[in-house]
Amino acid sequence: MKTISLEQIRSVLPGIDVVAAMEEGFVAYSEGRCIVPPVGELLLEKGEVHIKYGCIKGDEFYVIKVASGFYGNAALGLPTGSGLMLLFNQETGELATILLDEGHLTDIRTAAAGAVAAKHLAPKNVSKIGIVGTGVQARLQLLFLGGIVMCRDVLVWGRGAKQLEEYSAETSLDTFSIETTTDAARIQKECDLIVTTTPSKSPLLFFDHLRPGTHITAVGSDTSEKQELESGILSHADIVVADSIAQCLERGEIFRALSDGAMDANFPIELGKVISGESAGRTDSEQITVADLTGVAVQDIKIAEAVYRELRSEV
């Protein structure tokens, strides 16, 4: 058994179709072919740690992932996220490898899941993309959307001018036409594909400002304390999709809307069923759709297995 470094991981990721891997994982999850226990969570004074683990029945491995977010690290010149993934053989329990990804694989699989949600739920002809947030995930979400939608006009919301300037200066985003704002309402008034990526504990987007036909992918709210969308957005949406219904009943935007009495627990449908065609996704251009992505262990399983198979001969 050897440790796989972040450098090795980065070297093989361009050759992996992560979006397709996420689709396969979500379908397997919604078909009941996965064992995914509840999320382990450690909420600290200055950060949070998530432990996600599980397997796809019949696969070679099971996976345990530890990922953290310490949002004050930017002021210290440190990454906000870190972590690792452990692959074990399902037959013997033997540790196959340690993926010392420093949280990068979590970032990539999250961004790929956002692309999956847009692929199946966004309007056919997106006029402008809205990104709420300026961090790593805000950048990656846009990069992955570039492979899904033709639109290249982007409006980015951030809390300060410095963060927005740094976002706009990111060279990997230079194929997009990026405008910035500190007025979150502009995102809703001008954009019809919106991705939220912040750790906010109070709503940033509100139903009153929402355009008909808008799709929102909510990524940032992955605990019971966080909330980026006013619950009224979910109560007025035509379609609400969860990456995991069981998980979203306990955390994320769906949990907050249920807690506020703004929606029925039977209303959300699961992303894997939309992908497989078992449940209908968007059926007309005027529908408001919301995808609540809290991050499911099956995503970690699929990306960890894919990376390991690419590097297996080296370890």
Image (cartoon, rainbow, N blue to C red):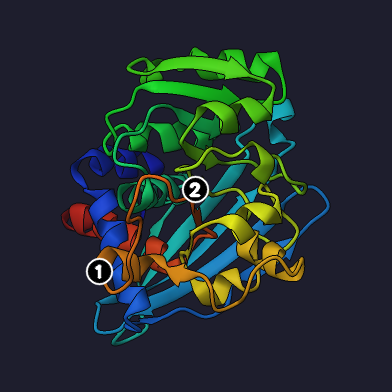
Question: In the image, 160: left or right of 283?
Answer: right
Query: Which three-letter amino acid code belongs to the residue tagged 2?
Result: Thr
Locate residue 312: give its quadrant: bottom left
Residue drawn at x 75%, y 36% is 72
* Residue under pointer 2: 217
The quadrant of the rendering that contains the N terminus is bottom left
Residue drawn at x 31%, y 42% is 8
* Residue under pointer 1: 276
Residue drawn at x 33%, y 71% is 279
From the top left corner, tell me how far across and down residue 302 is, in percent: 31, 63
Categorize mark 1 by other alpha carbons within 10 Å: few (<14), some (14-19), many (20+).
Answer: some
Q: Secondary structure at mark 2?
A: strand
| Mark nearer the N terminus (2 vs 1) | 2
Query: Which three-letter amino acid code belongs to the residue tagged 1?
Result: Ser
The quadrant of the rendering that contains the C terminus is bottom left
Near-viewer residue (140 or 315) = 140
